[in-house]
């Protein structure tokens, strides 16, 4: 993880509205501009901070991330009023020794956050905490691990951490890795009662039976199944599993040797019509594959010639939250990532956006060239007939700037573009990046983006921005 962060919490309301409804200082009287920045919340008490994921309900946003100083970090969750961005509450948990809150899922008035803490001499703990979304009150907390089996030195990869969380029908599902066999990381899927945090079941397995390191990165719930994707046998390939949501029993399993998803949590989507996985294949090509949700039987797959990687999936259509482009016609699967990269350098990539029919495969595709000639990674979310994609765009100044783009969901038509750092970001680390966008969430005509931006003093700011989505 990079470290940058600081400044007391500051709320900046960017969109000033006069009594006439026009934005102050706008001579053209422009109204309701799509992509208009409405507000941002930036900074934290510690020197550095980063927002890693964002979710919300009609009134509140909950942002998971970390705060830190020097080379250490601490679990950090911030609650924001969705309309104004005002900070309502914050939670810091565990010591400041490489802890962080990785993923958040909001269900009604409760927020569930997964991540980890680390204690010197005891190692890592797999952590999930439940909050009252409006007040930040901790409803329950579960910490698993911390002991000889969770010390990173025994061996280096044997860590006990939670990577992603999902909630449905009163159950919370958390995935990551725990060490239970042969002092290696085991593929871990755990379920808890959403109201009390009581453990319901766990599936902690060594899929190959060889004692290799195995990791679960992503989780989605659809109907009576919990779907999980991760990597097995010391990053030897992708593994996809379906669990019974009530008992945890493994219903089916598929492996994709040589494939991977770079530990990303949004490379999995699930609906009645199927399960969809994204990443790179054994030839390091952009890769999306569909499986039957009930049986795991492969349906179709998409591999692009040339180097690239799919980094995120979203559902657009009747199964997507907050509506979509094709209401009543079933979901459309949206994948984003980088395509057409130079095989020698993995640079000169284009931003790829591809839409698939859940049953039949590719429907349309878009590949956008960065102003400086290269894109890095990205996330995607769908709402109200639009797709919102983030990533890092190389600009003419030779730096990668965090960027947000909007497209039409029905045909991929471009609508608007915004720089998360306003194009003025710094690069005191010499990394080539001015900051990152790490999570996107759209609802009710607004797009919420969480990430961080570098400061000239060598720290970086926890940053959440809200744009007018349409």
Image (cartoon, rainbow, N blue to C red):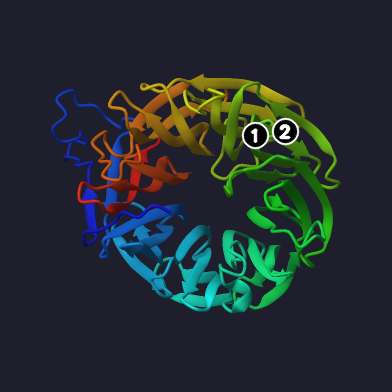
Q: Which of 45 and 18 is in front in this view?
A: 45
Q: Mark 2 points at which residue?
A: 358
Count the labels in the image. 2
Q: Say which residue appears at 56% left-offset and 25% top-offset.
A: 339
Q: Which of the two labelled residues, at mark 1 and mark 2, occupies the earlier sequence position?
A: 1
Residue 261 percent across, percent down from the top left: 62, 43
- Quarter of the picture holding the N terminus: bottom left
Q: Nearer the viewer, residue 463 or 125?
A: 125
The quarter of the picture where residue 100 lies is bottom left
Residue 423 percent across, percent down from the top left: 26, 33
Q: Would you say 16 lies left or right of 363 here?
A: left
Residue 354 drawn above or below residue 295: above
Residue 8 drawn above or below residue 429: below
Q: Say which residue appears at 72% left-offset and 40% top-offset.
A: 258
Residue 5 percent across, percent down from the top left: 29, 56
Are discs 1 and 2 less than 8 Å apart at CB? Answer: yes
Q: Say which residue appears at 50% left-offset and 78% top-offset.
A: 121
Q: Which mark is residue 110?
A: none
Q: Would you say 462 lies left or right of 30 here?
A: right
Residue 133 in view (yes/no)? yes
The quarter of the picture where residue 355 lies is top right
Q: Name the residue under label 1.
A: 333
The quarter of the picture where residue 9 lies is bottom left
Residue 240 percent across, percent down from the top left: 75, 49
Dot 2 falls on a residue whose secondary structure is: loop
């Amino acid at each position: 993880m990079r470290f940058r962060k600081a400044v007391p919490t500051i709320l900046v309301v960017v969109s000033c509205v006069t009594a006439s409804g026009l934005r102050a200082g706008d001579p053209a009287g422009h109204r309701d501009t799509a992509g208009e920045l409405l507000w941002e919340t930036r900074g934290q008490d510690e020197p550095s901070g980063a927002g890693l994921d964002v979710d919300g309900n009609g009134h509140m946003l909950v942002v998971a991330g970390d705060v830190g100083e020097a080379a250490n970090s601490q679990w950090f969750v911030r609650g924001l009023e969705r309309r104004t961005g005002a900070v309502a509450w914050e939670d810091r948990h565990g010591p400041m020794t490489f802890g962080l809150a990785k993923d958040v899922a909001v269900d009604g008035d409760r927020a569930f956050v997964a991540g980890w803490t680390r204690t010197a001499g005891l190692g890592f703990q797999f952590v999930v905490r439940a909050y009252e979304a409006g007040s930040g009150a901790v409803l329950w907390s579960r910490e698993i691990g911390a002991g000889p089996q969770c010390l990173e030195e025994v061996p280096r990869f044997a860590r006990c951490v939670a990577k992603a969380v999902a909630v449905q029908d009163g159950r919370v599902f958390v995935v990551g890795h725990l060490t239970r066999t042969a002092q290696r990381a085991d593929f871990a899927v755990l379920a808890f009662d959403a109201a009390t945090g009581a453990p319901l079941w766990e599936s902690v397995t060594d899929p190959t039976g060889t004692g290799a390191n195995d990791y679960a990165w992503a989780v989605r719930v659809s109907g009576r199944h919990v779907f999980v994707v991760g990597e097995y046998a010391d990053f030897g390939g992708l593994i996809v599993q379906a669990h019974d949501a009530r008992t945890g029993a493994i219903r089916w399993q598929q492996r994709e040797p040589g494939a991977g998803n770079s530990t990303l949590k949004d490379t999995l989507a699930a609906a009645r019509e199927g399960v969809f996985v994204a990443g790179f294949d054994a030839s390091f090509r952009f890769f999306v594959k569909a499986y039957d949700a009930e049986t795991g039987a492969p349906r179709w797959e998409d591999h692009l010639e040339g180097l690239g990687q799919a980094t995120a999936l979203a559902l657009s259509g009747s199964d997507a939250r907050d509506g979509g482009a094709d209401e009543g016609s079933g979901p459309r699967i949206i994948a984003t990532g980088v395509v057409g990269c130079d095989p020698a350098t993995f640079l000169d990539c284009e931003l790829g956006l591809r839409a698939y029919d859940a049953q039949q495969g590719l429907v349309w595709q878009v590949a956008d060239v960065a102003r400086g000639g290269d894109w890095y990674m990205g996330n995607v979310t769908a709402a109200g007939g639009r797709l919102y994609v983030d990533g890092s765009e190389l600009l003419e100044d030779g730096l990668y700037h965090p960027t947000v783009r909007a497209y039409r969901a029905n045909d991929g038509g471009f609508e608007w573009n915004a720089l998360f750092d306003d194009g003025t970001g710094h690069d005191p680390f010499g990394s080539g990046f001015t900051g990152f966008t790490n999570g996107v969430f759209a609802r009710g005509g607004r797009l919420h983006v969480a990430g961080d931006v570098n400061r000239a003093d060598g720290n970086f700011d926890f940053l959440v921005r809200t744009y007018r989505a349409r």
